[in-house]
Image: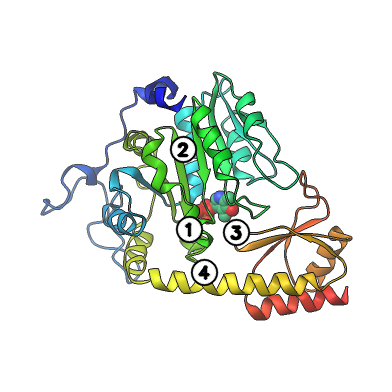
Amino acid sequence: MAKNFVLSDILRNNIKNITPYSTARDDFKGVALVNLDANENSFGSVGNGNYNRYPDPYQYELKQVVSKIKGMPIEQIFLGGSGSDEGIGLLYTAFCEPGVDNAIVCPPTYGMYGVSAEINNIKCKEVPLTEDFQLRADNVIAAMDEHTKLTWICSPNNPSGNLYDREAIRKVIEAANGIVVIDEAYIDFCPEYSWLPELDKYPNLVVLQTFSKAWGLANCRLGMMFASKEIIAVINKIKLPYNMNGMTQAYACKILSECAVQKDVLVEEILVAREKLIFDLQQLPSIKKIYPSDANFLLVKMEKAHDVYNYLVKEGIIVRDRTKVQLCDDCLRITVGTVKENELLVEKLKQF
Ligand SMILES: *Cc1c(COP(=O)(O)O)cnc(C)c1O
């Protein structure tokens, strides 16, 4: 049971004893008159900007902003400068002994859990979702063994778009001896279902979020991990020293505090466009099923999906072909576009 969870029992040994690289900027933040410690260019930067100094390795200012937005203390926040994908890799590094430990994934789901496992030589046990893309909690629990360190739960799930039943997720968290990671990349489209408010109940729970989707900042590669302060301390110990560049930090600090309302407007627009797109697609006879979505995309089952995909490519419209993915035969994953883009898509589908 999670209540007996002891972090040091499941950390890799080498990680337990590691002394992190201490960066020049850690020790004398704000007090130095002259910085001659980090082999930066003291004369300035090429170009017009001031980029010659290393950025804050722990993104303190930005974390203050994120802390306010998310209602989480800074010690429970890790920020990734390569998106939430960075967090996925770091969790393997922290908890999974290559060639020994394993993780559980529930396909069809986000591909990076498996890719990152392979990179780290970690075996992934697959426990497929049900036909309607719900978690099989009992099967997930049955697949766990003493070497299962990570269980990946993506809710809302990619590519199916739906949230999992909350009590099924809870059952898995409470039964796991290892870490359970809930990937909430799409949670801003259904924020009332986030697990963040429950984080303090479960010392083995990690929540991933991102600014890439609802906030529209995919280009910034700004990801978030939330967990107990003990887990975050471990992740901080093993992250790359300067894992987020200063331009992203400065830009995100400025706009995130100013633009929370704008995000809400974008989300609302996307949700309206999603409902319209669902309605329009339902009129097409070749559409067999549109799966319920809590996110900004739709999984759509249709006749000759693979041919439709190729046809759309020729017409300059790129969607995601999921026809070869488990439980997704004849399915395309379609991101909700602007009203115009969606209309063009529907128009082209009519002409197929
Ligand atoms: C898009 C996506 C991510 C990646 O987010 P980044 O922060 O851009 O790396 C993570 N998880 C899921 C399920 C996604 O669909």
Residue 158, position in %: x, y?
Answer: 63, 51
Residue 198, position in %: x, y?
Answer: 41, 43
Question: Mark 3 vs mark 4: which is more N-terminal?
Answer: 4
- Badge 2: few (under 14), some or many (20 or more) residues near its Cα, within 10 Å? many
Seen in the picture, residue 231 relative to 44 is either above or below; the reply is above
CA gap, disc 3 to disc 1? Answer: 10 Å
> Which of labels 2 and 1 is toward the front?
1
Mark linked to residue 90: 2
Q: Is residue 226 visible?
A: no
Q: Quadrant of residue 256?
A: bottom left
The residue at the point 77 percent across, 75 percent down is 346
Q: Amino acid at mark 1?
A: Pro
- Under circle 2, the secondary element is helix
The residue at the point 68 percent across, 58 percent down is 292
Mark linked to residue 294: 3
Question: Mark 3 vs mark 1: which is more N-terminal?
Answer: 1
Mark linked to residue 113: none
> Which of labels 3 and 2 is toward the front?
3
Q: Which residue is mark 1?
A: 191
Q: Is mark 1 within 8 Å of ligand 1?
A: no
Question: Mark 4 vs mark 1: which is more N-terminal?
Answer: 1
**Is 20 on the left or on the right of 290, as rendered?**
left
- Badge 4: few (under 14), some or many (20 or more) residues near its Cα, within 10 Å? many
